Amino acid sequence: MKLFRTKSEVPHQDTELKRCLNSFDLILLGIGAIIGAGIFVLTGIAAATKAGPAVVLSYALAGLACSFAALCYAELAASVGGAGSAYNYAYVGIGELIAWIIGWDLILEYGVSVGAVAIGWSGYVNDALNVFGLQIPPILLKTPSEGGFINLAAVFIVLFLSCIVAIGVKLSARVNAVIVVIKLLTITLFISVAIFNVHFSNWVPFMPFGWKGMVEGASLVFFAFIGFDAVSTAAEECVNPQRNMTIGIIGSLAICTTIYMVVAALLTGIVPYSTLNVKSPVAHAILAIGHESISGFIALGAIAGLTSVMLIFIYGFSRILYSMSRDGLLPKVFSEVHHKTHTPVKTILFCGVMMSLMAGFFSMHTVAELVNIGTLAAFVIVCISVLILRKTKPDLHRPFKTPLFPAVPILGIISCSYLMLNLPWVTWLRFVIWMALGLIVYFCYSYKNSRIHQS
């Protein structure tokens, strides 16, 4: 199998992406994708139902597991690259079948995650409207399982952002950069208010659900860290991927882990953890301590933050389908690039419709756990790919090497697998069904149409 695809190997003349992103763009891309539903939504859910104030340790544990995977991602992104993230790494390191499995897994991860974030987004939009005396009718805010008909706001925002991504990656990067600044200012505002309203009694008991609850909390808030994975999908649109991908992945993860732990500690310090099982916990907590106007600003900032997450995930989802299609594993239409926008417009719009349906009809908790198991499985395969490539291709140029090899990838495999085991059995059942469906698609379509088997 060839390690890199050359221009002549691309099946269509309009399948090349434009290189226009630098390391600063990638760091902002990572922050834009990472800081969102995790900090503005799942922190409260995890604290109230899983970990209590020990949710700060849940973030530390999830961040540690992510750091092992991030170092492996950085090595593969710098040496292998490609628009398909972990799919492309598995394609090079392990082979087509495993690459298909991880690609199918990533479709689940990205497709479902946008729906999860959109659900949180709609909750904050409703809170912001309440400040002005307006409210979305409950039947158009809740899913059928919650007693409503459709989450209409969530459907709208997914379709709108899909159109922005379709216009071009540079526009998406600029919009994301503006939103990242807004969300960081929002977090700064929250910290500056919360730090003077902490009641230490709210941290007692610190670990009300025990070690098991803290680990289950880590398995849930792991959703908050999947953004750095989206950075690696931009390798083919990066000006200097060997250098900039490493900076973007490691830099964004380090910054965001620190922010998560600080916010989690303050959030559980200003109000009892048991009151945080709401769709907009950060704004709710500030409102609970009597800062109504600031709560409104935080809700607006959260809306901006969640918007940037969806923007990056829609981008990442479309690039994974694009890469799999270019290898013949999916229909060719998914790798067609528009001659004006230099983006796979048809793929992006298809993704938008699918993800909007997910956002409109599924609940946040169910969707987040399904995303997490797919993400953790992807991280495990990335770590395995590093081990295999070091053995099978020792002479491969590696501008960045995973330190403490082979300890780091092995620890990544162990830690991510451990978090997977702490997810509910029903999540495992849904995951197994999805992967079984993927194998059926592979052997009925992808294997026959693969470029490897046709050449």
Image (cartoon, grey):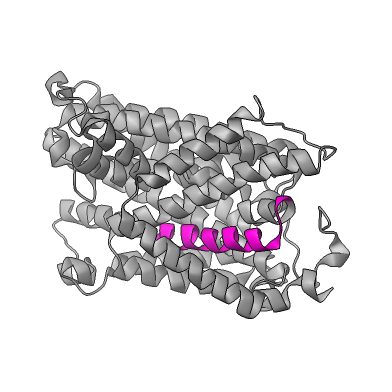
* Relative height, residue 382 to residue 139 (above, below): above
State which quarter of the image contains the N terminus.
Answer: bottom right
Residue 292 in view (yes/no): no
Which picture quadrant has residue 77?
Answer: top right
In the image, residue 97 lies in the stretch drawn in magenta: yes
State which quarter of the image contains the C terminus.
Answer: bottom right
Q: Nearer the viewer, residue 339 or 75?
A: 75
Overall secondary structure of the magenta section: helix
Which residue does the image show at 49% across and 30% down from the upper left?
A: 255
Q: Position of residue 402 (x, y in %)?
A: 67, 31
Q: Position of residue 151 (x, y in %)?
A: 27, 68
Which residue does the image show at 32% across and 69% down from the upper left?
A: 360
Left or right of 2 in this view: 76: left
Which picture quadrant has residue 58?
Answer: top left
Stretch of the chain drawn in magenta: 93-114
Count the numbered circles shown.
0
Q: Where is residue 121 in the image (x, y as percent from the top left)?
A: 32, 55
Which picture quadrant has residue 342?
Answer: bottom right
Residue 145 in view (yes/no): yes
Which residue does the image show at 58% across and 58% down from the upper left?
A: 102
Left or right of 372 in this view: 395: right
Q: Nearer the viewer, residue 234 or 417?
A: 417
